[in-house]
């Protein structure tokens, strides 16, 4: 069976991890209330988090680059 795992969980003990989880939920809720579509809200909230996580993996020593990547995702999402 095919499976996928990042190999570690998001540790909410780190302040930046907690901020991005809260921001992702906020983005999802804001888009859901604005568009009226739960699916669109979940897609943008999840995409925001995924953009942050991928940038964090590419540049683990710089916290700001991950937040910039998440913001760029929101700006250029169709």
Image (cartoon, helix red, strand yellow):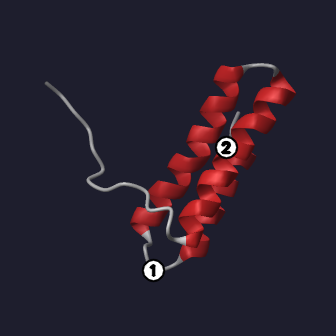
Residue picked out by circle 2: 25
Q: Pick the residue in front: 37 or 70.
A: 37
- In the displayed orientation, state which residue is furthest to the bottom: 61
Q: Quadrant of residue 63?
A: bottom right
- Say which residue appears at 51% left-offset and 71% top-offset: 14
Q: Pick the residue in front: 22 or 54.
A: 22
Crowding at dot 2, Cα within 10 Å, few <14 / some 14-19 / many 20+, comes out as: some
Q: Is residue 45 left or right of residue 33?
A: left
Distance of mark 2 from mark 1, alpha carbons?
Answer: 25 Å
Q: Quadrant of the C terminus?
A: top right
Q: Quadrant of residue 28?
A: top right
Q: Quadrant of residue 46?
A: top right
Q: Is residue 50 left or right of residue 24?
A: left
Residue picked out by circle 1: 61
- In the displayed orientation, state which residue is furthest to the right: 34
Measured from the top left, where is residue 9 in percent x and y?
Answer: 36, 54
Q: Nearer the viewer, mark 2 or mark 1?
A: 2
Element on which disc 1 rests: loop
State whether residue 76 appears in this view. no
- Say which residue appears at 69% left-offset and 22% top-offset: 38
Q: Pick the residue in front: 68 or 22.
A: 22
State whether residue 37 appears in this view. yes
């Amino acid at each position: 069976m095919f499976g996928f795992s990042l190999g570690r969980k998001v540790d909410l003990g780190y302040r930046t991890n907690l901020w991005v989880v809260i921001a992702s939920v906020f983005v999802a809720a804001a888009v859901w209330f604005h568009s009226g579509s739960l699916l669109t809200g979940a897609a943008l909230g999840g995409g925001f988090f995924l953009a942050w996580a991928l940038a964090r993996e590419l540049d683990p020593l710089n916290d700001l680059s991950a937040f910039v990547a998440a913001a760029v995702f929101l700006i250029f999402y169709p």
